[in-house]
Amino acid sequence: MDVQETGAGGAVAAGPEGLSQREADGRRRRGEGNAAVSRSGRSYAQILRTNVFSFFT
């Protein structure tokens, strides 16, 4: 772990460094973004109807 000195004589752990804005933009252009994708083909109403009127209720 990297440690850097503070002015008061104590030590503070340095956190990991992230991507620069330029690197993040480049990854997004290449399709390496972190966008959430909706994978459900049913609406909330259809899911609720299926669960409420199931065989076990």
Image (tube, grey):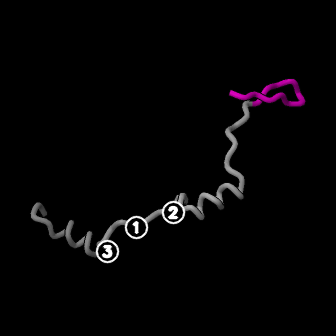
In which image quadrant can residue 54 be found?
Answer: bottom left
Can you give x and y, in whole percent of width and height, for residue 56 in the image?
A: 11, 60
- Work out whether 16 lies above or below 9: below
View extreme (top): residue: 9
Name which residue lies at 33% across and 68% down.
Answer: 40
Figure quadrant of the N terminus: top right
What kind of element bears circle 1?
loop
Residue that label 2 marks: 35
Residue that label 1 marks: 38
In which image quadrant can residue 28 be found?
Answer: bottom right
Observer-nearest of 37 and 47: 37
Residue that label 3 marks: 43
Q: Amino acid at mark 2?
A: Ala
Q: Amino acid at mark 3?
A: Ser
Can you give x and y, in whole percent of width and height, for residue 36 in the image?
A: 47, 63
Name which residue lies at 65% across and 57% down.
Answer: 24
What kind of element bears circle 2?
loop
Can you give x and y, in whole percent of width and height, for residue 14 in the image?
A: 73, 34
**Mark 2 / mark 3, whichever is N-terminal:** 2
Observer-nearest of 55 and 30: 30
Observer-nearest of 43 and 27: 27
Figure quadrant of the C terminus: bottom left
In which image quadrant can residue 41 be found?
Answer: bottom left
Q: Amino acid at mark 1?
A: Ser
Give the mark toward the camera: 2 or 3: 2
What kind of element bears circle 3?
loop
Name which residue lies at 71% across and 52% down.
Answer: 20
Can you give x and y, in whole percent of width and height, for residue 17 in the image?
A: 70, 42
Give the mark toward the camera: 3 or 1: 1
Q: Which residues are magenta?
A: 1-12
Q: Is residue 27 left or right of residue 17?
A: left
